[in-house]
Each structure stands twice: as C-alpha cells, then as structure tokens.
Image (tube, helix red, strand yellow):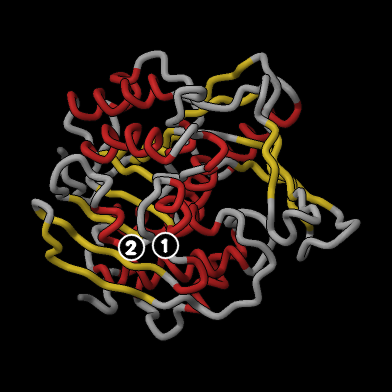
Amino acid sequence: MAIVNSPDHVLVVGDTTADLHPAAALSPGSELQWFPGGTATNVARGLALFDTPPALATRVGTDPFGRAVRTRLTSLGIDTTRCVTDPRPTPLTMPDPTDDRPGDTWTAWVRDTCYGVTLPDPVDAVETADLVHCSGTVLPPAVNQATVTETIAATQSQNVALSFDLNGRHNQWESAASYRDALTAPLAASSVVFASEHDLTVAGREPTLAGLKTLFPDPPSALVVLTQGADGATAARFTDGAITTQASHPGFSVDVAGTAGAGDAVTAAVLALLQAGVTALGQLLAVGTAAGAATTASAGPVRPADRNRMARLLAEWPTAWAGDGPSV
C-alpha cells in the first residue's frame, strides 16, 4: 500500500451528472439552475476551487449537458483529457420531494445514460499521479466494478496511493452483504478512506469508527475520515488495526439551503490539505467540516463563493491553509 506524502498530482475517478438545483432553498415551483455534478466531479471541482486542480476520469455525453460539463470543468483548470465522450446522454439529477420523501430528497436518472467511467488503459491513467481518488458510486457491478478493480491493481503496480470514498447508495446494492463484499478490495488497497454515517448504514454497520473498521478485510493502516452531517466529523489514523491518532470536530452552525455535495466538499478539502503536506488531524477536520458547512449554505455543490464562507467560518484559524492550526 502506498502512503500519501504530499502528492503533486491527483487523479479523480468516478461519475459525472448534470445536477439541477434550486436557486435558493427548495420549495414548490422553485426555479432551477444546473451544475456539473456526481460525487467524483464534485470532488474534482472542490479540489480545483481549493487551488488543487486534479485530472478527472469519467464519462460525459455528446449532448449539450455533456459538452457544457467539459467546458465548465476545463475552465476550472481540471485536466479533462481522461473524460471519455459517450454517445449516450448525460445522466440527470434533480430534487424530487414527494409526500413520502419530503425535504432534501433527490432522484438520479441514470438508466440508458453514460453514467460511470471508462479507463481504456488504467496503468497509463494512474502512472503520472501520486494519488488516485475513487468514488464508490461506480463500484456496483452494474456500473463499473471491473474498472474500479483494474484501477486498484494499476495503483498497486505503479505504487500510487489510493483514496476511496464509500458513497453507499441503498438502490445500488442488492443487500448490505453484497456491498460489504465489494468494499473489500478498495479498502484493502486504500491509504485514505472517507465514509459517512449513511454509508455505514448501507453496509449494515454501526455509524462509528469501530463500525468502519469492521469493513476492512485486514487490520487497516490508513487515514479514515467519518463525516457525521451537522455533527461534524471524526478522523483517525490506523496502524495495523490500532488507532494511533484520533480527532473530532463539531459541525459549524449555518443556515442550510441544501446538503447535496457537502460530503464531497469535505473530501476535496481534506485531500487538498494532504497535498499541501498538512497532516494534523485537527486541522484537516476543521477545514473539511468548514468546507462541508459552507457548501450547505447554498443550494448545489461547492462553488467559488463557498470558499469565502469557509474562510469566515475558519476565522479563528486564519493560517489554516499555511499549515498552522490545531493539531492532535
């Protein structure tokens, strides 16, 4: 397993969607605006907005959404040379509340679309990277499990560090057991792991660090980050299954317009700090939870204005990006 050590280049692997979001908090008759979305693309956008533009491997359609997604990502400095153009349409995601599913609920239309990722040559794709981040939304067999497996093998053969976000979705897995089985390979190979309480529920495990640890096939040696929604996040470093360092950070108080993309913003902020050489768990969590909270203050994924919100939330740690701040 490669160990993350200030990577110079990040490759994000996973899904892209066209996401429709309300201009403000969702209500009947809301006007919608669109953003490039999908868990992997959200992370890539976040990295770019946090001064760490990555390369992105994904699929986009030949339709106007697909062309616009590529243009918007390129404008942020994201390397889109591994974004494969697919003749099928770009998948669409939008809020879809019903009487049975009120509030911040979403539906993704992915059937018969280009949803997923294509890597014709995984070794070629990863060999110039120091860190590959993969989204678990493309792990299901019906999406791109074979590609994920090949990508993991490529990172191992090239001694490239792997970061993995569980991104569990109930509707993507036949059972919790099938999800746990699929997680075995990526977790065994990962140096950095992101999970939410919801992911662990999908996997049939307690939403705690102890529950996350049970998903690893062997005693883990990895940095793990567990997001806990409005309650903040917890992180730990495991060495041979034992926690050597652990920290938690409470959630920041914000008026929530929407939660979509908040977890991806946490992931992007933590990876950006790791790339900058920051290792203190307290600092990683402070900036990560601030990024997630700032993203929820407006409907949609992380955007340029969210960095300013994040900076205001972190006013008590003004040198956070410089490498100073609370450590554990």
Quarter occupied by residue 130? top left
Numbered disc 2: secondary structure? loop
Give the residue at mark 2: 208
In the picture, measured across the screen, residue 200 lies left or right of residue 29, that is: left
Three-letter amino acid code at the position of disc 2: Thr
The residue positioned farthest toward the right in the image shown: 29
Vertical side of 168 occupied by 67: above or below: above
Q: Residue 12, percent across and down?
A: 41, 37
Mark 1 or mark 2: name the one nearer the start of the chain: 2
Foreground disc of the pair 1, 2? 2
Image location (x, y in percent) of residue 290: 47, 71
Q: Estimate the x, y position of residue 178 in percent, counting from the top left.
A: 39, 33
Quarter holding the C terminus is bottom left
The N terminus sits in image quarter = top left
Q: In the displayed structure, does residue 43 sit left or right of residue 25?
A: left
Residue identifier under label 1: 227
